[in-house]
Amino acid sequence: MSINEHSSKEIRDQFISFFKERGHSFVHSSPVIPTDDPTLLFANAGMNQFKSIFLGHKEITIRRAVNSQKCIRAGGKHNDLEEVGKDGYHHTFFEMLGNWSFGDYYKQEAISWAWELLTGLWKLPKHLMYATVHNSDTEAFELWKTLTDIDHSHISYHGDKDNFWEMGETGPCGPCSEIHIDRGADSCDKQGVEGHVCRVNGDCARYIELWNLVFIQYKREANRELSPLKHRFVDTGAGLERITQVLQDKKSNYETDLFIPIIEKLATLSGVAYNQDTGTSHRVIADHVRCLCFALADGGFPSNEGRGYVLRRILRRAARHGRLLGFAEPFIHVLVDTVVSVMGHHFTELAGKEEYIKMVIKAEEERFNKTLDTGLDKLNDLCANAPHGVISGIDAFTLYDTYGFPLDLTMIIAEEKGLVVDMEGFNVEMVAQRTRARNASKFSLQTFDNEWIELAKPTPTIFVGYLEKSIQANIQRYSIDDDMNVLLQLDKTPFYAESGGQIADKGTIFNTDFELNIHDVKKQDDYIIHYGKITRGALSVNPVNAEIDMQNRKDIARNHTATHLLHKALRDVLGTHVQQKGSLVHSQYMRFDFTHFQGMSAQELKAVESIVNQAILENRALHTDIQDIETAKQGGAIALFGEKYSEEVRVVEVEGFSKELCGGTHVNATGELGFFKICSEASSAAGIRRIEAITGRAALAWIEDMQNVSNNIAESLHCTVANIEPKLEALLAHNTILETQLKALQAKAANDYVHKLLAQSVQMDEFKLLCIRTMITTMDELKLITDSLKAQCTDGIALLFNVWEEKLNIVCVVGSKLIPKYHAGKIISKLAEKLDGKGGGRPESAMAGGKALDKIQDVMRDAVNIIKTV
């Protein structure tokens, strides 16, 4: 086997072509950010997108499939993050080559094809190959003996830990057969360890797994019993990085052509050459930038919770390793083009998003550099003064909460300095938030646990709501509780199920016997479920009429079309870096989240509104068309980040204006929107802005409200609406004059008051002392008096103990001639301490609060001694 005989591109293409030639349909990788599985932080296996088929929630539409799935394992159950960089095979992002059978072929074909590809096409040495099977799977054992020419002594039985696959605590499962290769005795990383023996499924790097063939034939019941599935499935997975390492005869995944271009670019930028022994930081950065590119391209975004927090940790871990290579300025974003050049030919979703990915990464790097600099200074102080080698939980939490310094970095740096972090104390401080990874618990499985009453075998619901508003349909199944709340599935429906940010339709399902008021509609795999309440009669059998509320539908359609117009206008005004990050299309309003790193100016908002309203005035027609996805993209249709699209997509075009892939409901022409008004623009998350806006009837109501407000103001000002602005300007100008006069009077009054106070000063050894209790009613007045004291009391010290409505404020002023011998901030701190308060300030003046009002007289009597001891 010659070095570099196969490129990674060739290996991927050969795998896919091999199975396509054997009747498999190529299925594009699903996004690494799951769009339809709330149990997952990230796609972490090839089977994720087929999970609904395994669970029986979705009809089998293809019998054989092949793909290369993008996977991320960082956070949650599968978390390799902290191991990445320490060896040659751990990754956060990797590709899983796989082939599937959905009730079609089984063990015989899976085993023979795997052997043919590995030893026939790729010419791997047969004498180095090993196969493992589950203890119970004599069938697979015999198939390996009879179908292949593997050395029979290289086939072995193993237990559940290594050779039995389960989706979860319950659900589909089955035995698996793994294919391993012997990399030679020199590859063992446990040489010299007493008692170590190299073996398949051992604990060293000599025998490595290449391919796992999973035979899904059982369902694990809640009582842990196994029952046979109706259909049997094959689910295989072979890591591209590992296959490439073997075929290119490398000792590490990071030495393959999947990583070397990135590592070489990094070495050039940093001036630090890479080698296997000291290249931990190179490996960390090369892995992490791949992960970030794919996660951002698929709709992920760094944030402080859930998967966004995991991405932020990955980015910051890479940034910190950059510091170890000498980078002081952002650098990760410079590697993006290299990643795209290596991976973009197959994963075309990267193309065109390079600038966006760079922008997000660079902004995060800049933000983290500031955090890191500030946090490192604080952490170094803590480390230098850590009692008994322990950084307290309170200090670690302060770093995390106040300075945004990641806990994992605190722990790593503490460990490097021979210290530990009091995690128990940190967790106590973190009660309300806990660790960010715990926030992933919101990704919980949503199921319909209701007892269904079936009137017919449920079939995928046919949606006819693009064209039909009222139809006759048949009930397939329903569930009803004692309060007459109903879940109901029809064979077809005009009701749009909540999807893509658009809320569901409302309406009624009825016949002569009953009426069901529908208030929500949700989609579960291929089934559309109507949520309603019976308002008349009792639920009866078919047929029924299903009728949507058209006024509500039109309000929703106006707002959905408005999101398309807004998206285009934002890109025109702000730039093409703007990408939709989420939306809510409601009947009353629309909400649109988009990427942009600063608030919009009034001029920008006005320009966006103008573009949208101009498109409305032009009454542009909307056209919808079903196209294959590549044709749609080539035609200029915008695909949303992270969306999983089928081979055929629905294109919504606003004639001569915009074109997007969209499954929602829309108006026939833009003029139906009437009027578009932005109500607010604000930050939604770091790097994401949010606009809320209204159209149609809600916009007309807003105009009427504004007209009423204008009329009321005009009436109060005794002028016409047209004269409100000049009238207000005149009033404000007059007000400013009055405020200036008032402030002058207040300042004179304060000066006079201070003059009288200072007359009560007592001469001490080195200074005059004014120590008096006052009853000043406002803080503004107290500040005026403090300023006057600073101006008049140049050779003395003034102490005011002001009590009003049971609240104590202490003021200390030190004359300019007594500084620096006396310091107002230090004096006030000592006084406040004796009065159960705290405070501080500058040398010339300071202020504090206190609670112990009963001690004021004692403290005033002891004021001279307190001043002298500071």
Image (spheres, rainbow, N blue to C red):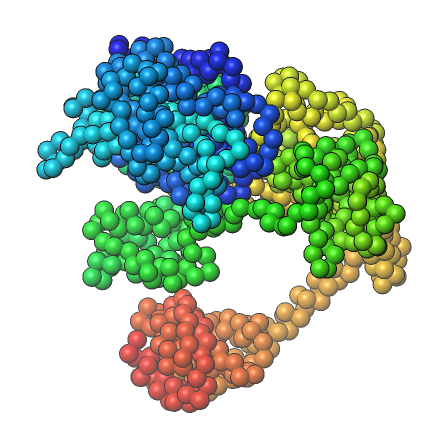
Determine which quarter of the picture holds residue 558.
top right
Residues 267 and 217: in front is 217
Near-viewer residue (702 or 851):
702
Q: Quadrant of residue 592?
A: top right
Image quadrant assignment for residue 257: top left
Total residue callouts: 0
Eyeballing the image, is 183 above or below 720?
Answer: above
Q: Is residue 581 left or right of residue 469?
A: left
Indicate the quadrant containing the C terminus: top left, top right, bottom left or bottom right: bottom left
| Residue at 44% in and 74% down | 848
Q: In this view, does 641 lie above or below 771?
A: above
In the image, taking residue 673 as reference, residue 374 lies left or right, namely: left
Q: Is residue 400 left or right of residue 439?
A: left
* Left or right of 195 in this view: 142: right
- Residue 19 locus on image (x, y percent): 46, 15
Taking depth in this image into account, of 778 and 500 the one nearest to the observer is 500
Q: Quadrant of the N terminus?
A: top left
> Is residue 495 positioned above or below 396 on the image?
above
Q: Can residue 665 be seen in this view?
A: no
Name the spot of residue 597 as percent of width and height, x first: 55, 39
Q: Which residue is drawn at 44% across and 89% down?
A: 854
Please report the residue visible at 34 percent of the width from the left and 84 percent of the height from the top: 864
As displayed, is residue 85 above or below residue 806? above
Residue for point 37% across, 78% down: 833
Residue 36 visible somewhere in the drawing: yes
**At which x and y percent is residue 761?**
43, 85
Provide residue 813's location: percent of width, then percent of height.
43, 74
